[in-house]
Image (cartoon, grey):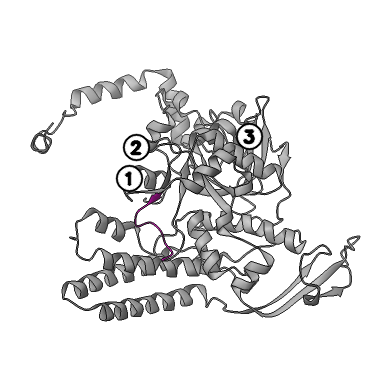
Amino acid sequence: MTQESRDRVPGAVLGHAAVDELTEAFGSDRANAVARNATTSMGVNKAARNPVAMRAYTDTFGVSLKSAKTVTNQRHSGRCWMFSTLNVLRARAMEHLDVEDFELSQAFSMFYDKLEKANAFLNNVIATADLAWDDRTVEYLLQWGSAEQDGGEFAFAANLVTKWGVVPKSAMPETASTKDSSQMNATLGRMLRRDAVELRRLVASGEDETGVTAAREAMLADVHRVLCACLGEPPTTFDLELSVGPKAKVDGTLCEAALPARNGDDEKPRRILRERGITPREFQERYVGFDAADYVELVHVPATGLEEGHAYGVRWMDTVSGGAPMRLLNVGIEAVEDAAVASLKAGVPCYMACDVMQEFGRNLDDFPGTLALGTIDREGLFGVELGMSRTDMLDARETCFTHAMTFQGVELGEDGRPAAWRVENSWGKDACKDGYLVMSGDWYRLYGGDVVVERRFVDEATLKLWDEVPLEYTEPWGVLSSAMGLAR
């Protein structure tokens, strides 16, 4: 069909008589009446819940890691990718410091994420200033490319940690604007779109590079001011004082002995770690030990136009100018699973992402933390077909990685493949099952497929691909960007 034909043809007209006949027929079917009564009174998920399927999944795993006592909470913000990354890093810090609980500051990372996103956005606006307002790239940047977006993924967090470091949560705690970022984000979005108009006018008027750069720097100063007001000033140095265990891997000159804690029968020996004027990067290097080059991101995105064994990035997507580009190695689901299982068996949690709200009874009272196929039976409730292959869902934009969490355990089936996963969430201790999810292996194969692990947990053939295949860039409005949940 030609474009002219598409412009002229209105398509089939929906007739009154046909719809009236469907309406009359609906009420005469008893199953329809039951579905109507249940769904109108309690909503779709509660009416469609399948308790027989849900009770088959329990929080018992053959491989289960000892996790922190505190369940983190991203509140009303889209920082799951940041929380997941920092939850992986805090496990390193807990081992290093020999402590049972620890939390890194998400507000600190959020501050620099917003500032870096603003810088990348303004750079991209300048780079595309010669394109028309309705050019697809310009439209994408204006809609999705500014600091008003909370979303991201592991590579963004890795660049932030590498460049800016991390600090304990006590050094920069949460604020009203981290707990609910909507008002701050609306302000940033308005500011940056106004800045985009001004920068494009400057370029169009023939302003030289010095003048454009000065304008950009003034705009970033405004962004910094708003962030400081909303999140507080990020510490450039801070005094570290922390009770650590006897096996803490720290310089003895920085620690002093302390009396055992007097909490009932708890008399575990401890030491006090004190260090004055430490920088966030020094803290990361000494007590976390994160090296972004030591991590591999494997995704299973079997969408049309994307091939296994290829490494992909998304044009205009990277948020830290000068940082390492996002690199995603597209592999089979078995390679994703094998890397995650190897990490967990070694006692190391790993970053993961999935389409968390698919077939998820999040607010069910009796099974609030179960992600498994067949637990929310909408097909049976409505008498319709909903089944789709993963490829069809990706192509049709029906699924994407909407949420990042952390794998903390796995149960292997008789065939050696994952039967269920234990997942640490970032919705607080009162959400799901005490802050955790039980995820069936089949569910993850259909709605998941993104993990980040250390290189040592990746098989030799896959690691060779990661190291050697060239990076291919896709467009930000393409299927990969959609699958990663980055353009929505």
| Amino acid found under the numbered disc labelled 3 | Ala
User: Which circle marks residue 478 in the picture?
Assistant: 1
Residue at (50, 32) in percent of width and height = 47
> Residue 159: x, y in percent?
50, 62
Q: Are marks 2 and 1 in contact (CB under 8 Å)?
A: yes
Instruction: Please indicate whether residue 256 sits to the left or right of residue 38 in the image.
Output: right
Name the amino acid, label 2.
Gly
**Foreground: 175 or 189?**
189
Q: Residues within 10 Å of mark 1 (few under 14, many from 20)?
A: few
Out of 293 and 443, give the one closest to the viewer. 293
Which of the two labelled residues, at mark 3 and mark 1, occupies the earlier sequence position? Answer: 3
**Front label number (2 vs 1):** 2
Mark 3 or 1, closer to the camera: 1
76 over 237 or under it: above or below:
above
Q: Amino acid at mark 1?
A: Gly
The residue carrying mark 3 is 420
- Is residue 119 in view from this perspective? yes
The residues bearing labels 3 and 1 have C-alpha atoms spaced at a distance of: 31 Å
Above or below, 226 relative to 313: below
Classify mark 2: residues with Cα within 10 Å, few (<14), some (14-19) or many (20+): few
Q: Main secondary structure of the magenta part?
A: loop
The residue pinned by badge 2 equals 305
